[in-house]
Amino acid sequence: MIKFLSSLRLFFAVTLALGAVLIYQTLFNRGAPVYGTPWFAALGVLAAANIAACALGRARTASARFLLLHTGLVVIILGAFLTRFYRFEAELPLRAGETTDTAYAGTAAYKLPFSVTLEDFSLEYYAEPLGRITVETDGSREVFDAKEGTVIEVPGLAPIKVLRAVRDFGLTAGNKVIEKSPYWHNPAVQLELKSGGKTRKLWFFSNFPAMHAQTLPFGVFYAVEQAEIKNFTSAVALKTAAGRELKAKISVNRPFKVDGYTLYQTSYDPAEAGYSLLTATLDRGAWVVYAGFAMLLMGVLLWLRK
């Protein structure tokens, strides 16, 4: 068994399999990550067993650098398993102006050793979104900018006037139209147009393009271009159990660490501009991975001194 586990053929087979899996995950996989699957874990166990068996087979005669390199690789793999199975991860929902120290994993609630207050939440677009109005008749299809005050003239139709454009349509209790946020969550435009001999004021929504399709003899559609979100950021204030007060801006690619925990920007709610969802994690096995890298580095340094 030791001879089989320590063979180079097994090493190359496992290495090629892991390489293929990593390429697939990075370039092609659009579903759930493969890293949590049992078969990927089995590949990791086999790789660790192969490296350990190789080191054990030469333990009496091998140099210190050889043992350090192989032991470091095994410890890194074991640390990855510890991180996977003993990692704490829970969702931390935040609302503007509110303070919380409770995170949730499924139906379980966990009290964190610090509190978090969401002071501000912001979205960043790749480019400034643009509203476009499309008017379709039997003989034409024309597109216009949705700027307030614009008068749209199409042959065969009465002029259409853009009365109002909002990025995030909302209604008060008194049915007054308001802009709920400065972000393009529910864009809408109000037009004044003539249909059936009557002048009408109608709202057209980008999210509901067919809203008036059955009531007008011509087609009017509202759409928003360049509304791709580049990043979203939560500006938070934290207070630790020791009384420290911290400020941080947490975005998709910029997590924040506090008291051993790492806070990641996970999501937001387009229907609620002042809502942000963070993920709180605690990697209990991270120190094992660091120890493995330290052994690996020492082995490399000894190898270079040869």
Image: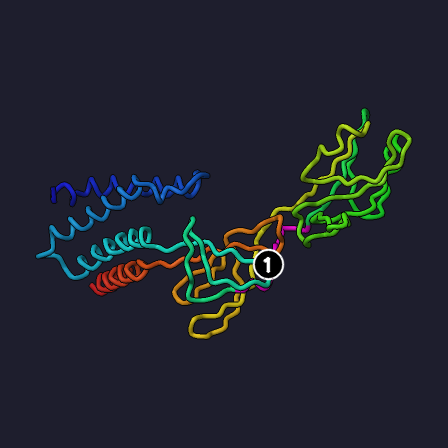
Asked whether the viewer can see residue 274, the reply is yes
Q: Which residues are magenta?
A: 117-128
Residue 54 lies, in percent from the top left, at 16, 49
Q: Is residue 256 magenta?
A: no
**Viewed as shown, does residue 268 lie left or right of 279?**
right
Image quarter of residue 143? top right
- Residue neighbourhood size for the residue with mark 1, other residues' Cα within 10 Å, grouped as few (<14), some (14–19), many (≥20): many
The foreground one among 214 and 59 is: 214
**Viewed as shown, does residue 247 lie left or right of 62?**
right
The foreground one among 157 and 303 is: 157
Report the residue that reaches farthest toward the right: 197
- The C terminus is located in which quarter? bottom left
* Residue appearing at x 37%, y 56% in the figure: 88
Image quarter of residue 280? bottom left
Q: Is residue 191 above or below residue 86?
A: above
Report the residue that reaches farthest toward the top: 138
Q: Is residue 124 magenta?
A: yes
Report the residue that reaches farthest toward the bottom: 243
Residue 49 lies, in percent from the top left, at 19, 47
- The N terminus is located in which quarter? top left
**Viewed as shown, does residue 211 lie left or right of 101?**
right
Q: Main secondary structure of the magenta part?
A: strand
* Residue appearing at x 83%, y 40% in the figure: 201
Q: Is residue 76 above or below residue 242?
A: above
Q: Is residue 234 above or below residue 240?
A: above
**Viewed as shown, does residue 66 lie left or right of 130?**
left
Report the residue that reaches farthest toward the left: 60
Residue 292 lies, in percent from the top left, at 26, 59
* Residue appearing at x 73%, y 39% in the figure: 222
Residue under label 1: 121
